[in-house]
């Protein structure tokens, strides 16, 4: 059974940092890419970043380029999202997801099959 579990969310001040984790079970990250999405209240779910399992290539939405870094630890079957220089507009529930492929499709929710339950990130002074 495929399961994705996010952790690491919380409340942080503008300019601060958080690291989110996505622990996978039921499949190995050696063969499946993982993405991060976020959804703010009243808004559509937005793709943030994806890391390919085939070559480790990362992809980022323009809104987070230069601030967020995605990485993976295959030995721990875990993907991380390091978020720096956080802004109030980064406030959202963050989800990890997998398309069930080794490459990263477009960062749109219908391309992704497996989802975690989400972790809340709040950026506020």
Image: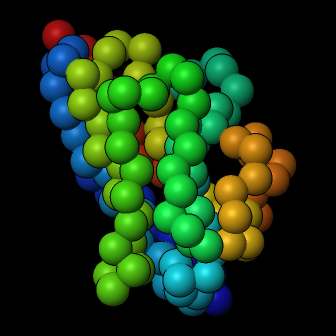
- Quarter the C terminus occupies: top left
- Image position of 44 (left or right of 22): right
Q: Residue furthest front?
A: 55
Residue 46 locus on image (x, y percent):
64, 32
User: Can see residue 95?
Assistant: no
Give the vertical position of 14 relative to 31 (above or below): above
Q: Residue furthest right?
A: 110
Asked which quadrant contains residue 6, the reply is bottom left
Residue 90 locus on image (x, y percent):
41, 23
Tell me what residue is drawn at x 66 percent, y 21 percent: 43
Tell me what residue is drawn at x 66 percent, y 34 percent: 45
Residue 8 locus on image (x, y percent):
27, 52
- Quarter the N terminus occupies: bottom right
Tell me what residue is drawn at x 83 percent, y 49 percent: 110
User: Can see residue 78?
Assistant: yes
Tell me what residue is drawn at x 18 percent, y 18 percent: 15
Give the vertical position of 52 relative to 74 (above or below): above
- Image position of 17 (left or right of 46): left
Near-viewer residue (58 or 97): 58
- Image position of 86 (left or right of 15): right
Give the vertical position of 113 relative to 81 (above or below): below
Near-viewer residue (108 or 116): 108
- Image position of 27 (left or right of 125): right
């Amino acid at each position: 059974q495929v399961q994705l579990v996010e952790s690491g969310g919380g409340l942080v001040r503008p300019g601060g940092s958080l690291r989110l984790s996505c622990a996978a079970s039921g499949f190995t990250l050696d063969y499946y890419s993982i993405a991060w999405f976020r959804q703010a209240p009243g808004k559509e779910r937005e793709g943030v970043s994806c890391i390919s399992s085939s070559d480790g290539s990362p992809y980022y939405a323009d809104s987070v380029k230069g601030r967020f870094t995605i990485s993976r630890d295959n030995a721990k079957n875990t993907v991380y999202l390091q978020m720096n220089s956080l802004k109030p507009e980064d406030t959202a529930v963050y989800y990890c997801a997998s398309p069930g492929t080794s490459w990263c499709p477009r960062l749109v929710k219908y391309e992704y099959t497996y989802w975690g339950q989400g972790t809340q990130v709040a950026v506020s002074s």
